[in-house]
Amino acid sequence: MTQRSVIDALEAAYPMLRGTIRDTVKQQRRPMVRFFACGQDLSNEPGRCVAAGCGGEGVEPYLIVGAMAGGTNRAG
Amino acid sequence: MAGVRVLVGTRKGAFILTSDSKREQWEVSGPYFAGWEVYHLKGSPVNPDRLYASQSTGWFGQLIQVSDDGGKSWTPAGNEFLYEGTPGTHLWYDGSQHPWEFKRVWHLEPSLTDPDTVFAGVEDAALFRSSDGGKTWQELAGLRNVKGGLWQPGAGGMCLHTILLDPSNPNRIYIAISAAGAFRTDDGGETWLPINKGLRSDYELPDPTADVGHCVHNLAMHSSQPGVLFMQKHWDVMRSDNAGDMWHEVSGNLPSDFGFPIAVHAHEPETIYVVPIKSDSEHYPPDGKLRVYRSRTGGNEWEALTDGLPQENCYVNILRDAMAVDTMDPCGVYFGTTGGQVYASTDAGDHWTAIVRDLPAVLSVEVQVLP
């Protein structure tokens, strides 16, 4: 199970989230979103397996979080 | 009992202000979508309890929200705004071509006849339509065929911010884009015409009378005269008497003809309102005096409306979607400021009261009269 497949499943279950986590065309992570699992920042490893390799039992949470930064654009 | 509902989008959430028909006592509810920018929210003319809202943040981008109980509860709707075909490119700040990229929804315009049909004006500029209550969106891509490669972003981005639906002709729609200009369709959105003849942008465009590229800030129309349009351009207040085929300037005696919103009185189609702003680099009222200007002659002759508005040390801005009128008698006029005040006049602008203060910066104001 990769990060990409996790997000695919999430967006399939909740279509209103399409575009909020990654770009709908390029499928790239939105710049101010981060992916955490097993105590690691996996934001730049979309193909990485997230169900194995943590040394746990496969029940660790997969976190999609807003980056530690403020918003942008005209309204600031 | 009839009442009035004011829908306010702000930098950090939405607020709903309600009053009975006297419009004296106001109840403030919100923030809805706290912490998110709400560029616009608007109700269906057919079903006033059907509201659409556009919320966004720098983190998670854009969401569309729908309410069927007048804003008490909200449900996320569809969020896929995909440009039709290969999106192509438009002019970028540095003169290069830049790919079209969806950023956010600036304006939502519900259909005049069907509560499930709604139009969305987006950045990068394009027009989308949903016929299923916001679940899915389709681009009216013919618009971008009108020299889209020459459109360019203004300071606020390249946004489609104004959508006017002609109540006498369901196939006619007007839209405006910063910085591309005004456009009209007469076939329901299949094909579009630039309607920018008569506009002059002497210091913004190398060809001041170009077909496209003008920074139109807002358009307004009265439902009884759908062929008469009023425009607040970057500089200049303009009027067209032939559905945008030709414009002429009606700035007249305004202290500054720079500004953002423009509105038409609900019962007097020749009475219009603007809020002059000092300049494009100084986004606040001239002389620190917040003055709405009203023309009862369709432009050229303007009077300052100041009673109840701060007349010293006022340096707020009023953004393009932040002024609206109600259909009560006398007509109510409302506007919100970047300082967080929402002002209301229940007598067509003669007197003003701040019905709420200290909200986040106001991005949009819409008004509904409830049965």
Image (cartoon, coloured by chain):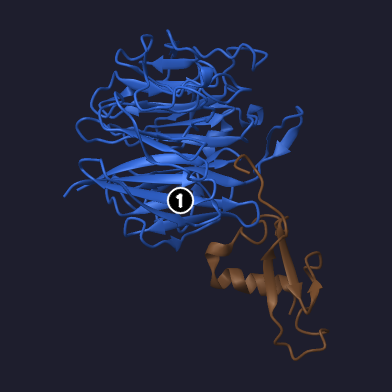
Q: Is residue B188 visible?
A: no
Where B281 sits versus B160, above or below?
above
- Viewer-nearest residue: B233 or B345: B345
Where B194 sits versus B111, above or below?
above
Q: Position of residue B256 (x, y in %)?
A: 50, 14
Answer left or right for B168 relative to A17: left
Question: In the image as oriented, which residue stretches furthest toward the front?
Answer: B312
Q: Position of residue B319 (x, y in %)?
A: 50, 33
Identify by letter the chain in blue. B
Q: Position of residue B311 (x, y in %)?
A: 44, 22
Q: Is residue A14 visible?
A: yes
Q: Amino acid at mark 1?
A: Ala
- Viewer-nearest residue: B254 or B175: B254
Q: Chain of mark 1?
A: B
* Residue drawn at the location 45% of the way across and 59% of the way down: B135
* Residue drawn at the location 52% of the way across and 18% of the way down: B286
Answer left or right for B4 relative to B245: left
Q: Badge 1: how crowded within 10 Å, few (<14), some, or many (20+)?
A: many
Chain A image colour: brown
- Viewer-nearest residue: B43 or B186: B43
Where B82 sits versus B256, above or below?
below
Question: In the image as oriented, which residue stretches furthest toward the bottom?
Answer: A57
Q: Position of residue A10 (x, y in %)?
A: 61, 72
* Residue drawn at the location 37% of the way across and 27% of the way down: B263
Image quadrant in which you'd find residue A64: bottom right
Q: Which residue is mark 1?
A: B14
- Viewer-nearest residue: B123 or B282: B282
Question: In the image as oriented, which residue stretches furthest toward the left?
Answer: B1
Number of numbered callouts drawn:
1
